[in-house]
Image: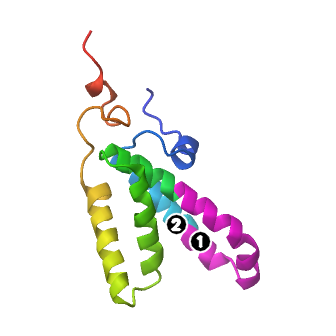
Amino acid sequence: MSGQTDWVELLMSSTGRIARMPFLIAGAGLIAITALYESVAGTALHLMTGWFVYPTILFAAACILSKRLHDRGRSGWWAAPILIGIIAILPSPTSFFDFLFGVLVFWATIELAVMPSEEGANRFGPNPSNPLSGAAAI
């Protein structure tokens, strides 16, 4: 492995594992792209292109969330409630359910952005930080 990140594979596939740093960089990139789109697109452009832009961003977010969840030994399906929670609390939380979604997003932030990778290989593949740690000794 060359140590290079394949960004198309990272953003368009939910299989495998990724370490914290590529996850944080990809997440920050998706947030920046979304913020740029929101600031540039006027109402008419937003209505015409939003049907393509938002599903693409959500798909890429689900892929990177799934890979990071795999790295922590969790099922990628946990990306769905995390994304629903993020959508529910934006732009600002207003109800008790938004508080519950906020707790979910807080847990996901700690779990995915702070906690280290699961040691060694797991059912989703080798450790991306140290791919040889899960290899069998010859």
Horizontal arrangement in the rendering, residue 88 relative to residue 38 (left or right): left
**Residue 22 visible in rendering:** no
Q: Give the percent coordinates (x, y) of residue 2.
A: 45, 28
Q: Which residue is mark 1?
A: 36
Q: Which is the main secondary structure of the residues drawn in magenta?
A: helix
Q: Indicate the quadrant where residue 110 lies.
A: bottom left
Q: Callout 2: 10 Å neighbours few (<14), some, many (20+)?
A: few
Q: Give the percent coordinates (x, y) of residue 62.
A: 49, 56
The verdict on residue 43 being magenta is: yes
Q: Nearer the viewer, residue 131 or 62?
A: 62
Q: Tell me the element at label 2.
A: helix
Q: CA distance from mark 1 to mark 2?
A: 6 Å
Q: Indicate the quadrant where residue 34 lies.
A: bottom right
User: What's the residue at 50%, 59% (across, down)?
Assistant: 29
User: What's the residue at 47%, 54% (across, down)?
Assistant: 26
Q: Given the image, on which type of amino acid does mark 1 rest?
A: Leu
Q: Tell me the element at label 1.
A: helix
Farthest residue in the bottom direction?
Answer: 94
Q: Which residue is mark 2?
A: 32
Q: Callout 1: 10 Å neighbours few (<14), some, many (20+)?
A: few
Mark 1–mark 2 CB contact (< 8 Å): yes
The residue segment tinted magenta is 34-60
**Residue 6 visible in rendering:** yes
Q: Give the percent coordinates (x, y) of residue 14.
A: 49, 46
> Which label was assigned to residue 87?
none
User: What's the residue at 24%, 48% (across, down)?
Assistant: 116
Q: Nearer the viewer, residue 37 or 119?
A: 119
Image quadrant where one finds the N terminus: top left
The verdict on residue 119 being magenta is: no
* 15 in relation to 104, above or below: above
